[in-house]
Image (spheres, rainbow, N blue to C red):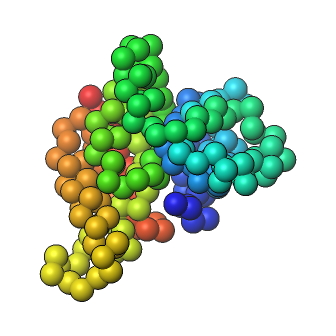
Amino acid sequence: MLSTPDEAQFLSMLLKLINAKNTMEIGVYTGYSLLYTALAIPDDGKILAMDINREYYELGLPIIEKAGVAHKIDFREGPALPLLDQMIQDEKYHGTFDFIFVDADKNNYINYHERIIALVKVGGVIGYDNTLWCGSVAVPPDSIMDERLRYFRDFVLEFNKAVALDPRIEICQLSIADGVTLCRRIS
């Protein structure tokens, strides 16, 4: 939901290291990680930002504007999957994104992955937030935990297993914040 400062700083440095220029963010909330992305990419860089709630985005928009980076952001309100499906239909979007960050509905992480893998360029990076899900992915399945925690834990665990087996990417799971999984597209 909201990236932590260490996670945002790490992603900002990563964007600079890979010379990212064309990026996407699925799940914006108030735009904290979006701001860090906009500050990290060049002045002519672009971010396609998607979220189901424009109100939260607009809470952070004055800070984005004050930082002078609002011109880099193309915000789209609504569910991301239909927009991704449209983009996949148009081959001009295939392999055009240097970096894609996903911090949205965990039950759709696999669905997002299957779509955005075609949109990120070979050598590009996809980052998924909350892939440790409060550490719950590392505890035995019969552990006592909150119902909501368990519900999303199962989706996150299924996602983690799926990307670990995906031959199109190489992955690195980091314990920053609530877990960040980086996927570098190799084919």
Residue 14 appears in the picture as rendered: no
Q: Residue at x 45, y 38 (%)?
A: 80
Residue 6, image x, y percentages: 57, 65
Residue 104, image x, y percentages: 45, 51
Does residue 184 sit above or below 104 in this rendering? above
Does residue 142 sit above or below 8 in this rendering? below
- Residue extending farthest to the right is 66
Say whether residue 183 is left or right of residue 3: left
Q: Nearer the viewer, residue 164 or 110?
A: 110
Quadrant position of residue 75: top right
Q: Residue at x 66, y 35 (%)?
A: 73
Does residue 15 sit above or below 141 in this rendering? above
Say whether residue 127 is left or right of residue 44: left
Residue 73 appears in the picture as rendered: yes
- Residue extending farthest to the bottom is 144
Q: Residue at x 29, y 60 (%)?
A: 156
Residue 103, image x, y percentages: 46, 52
Say whether residue 92 is left or right of residue 107: right
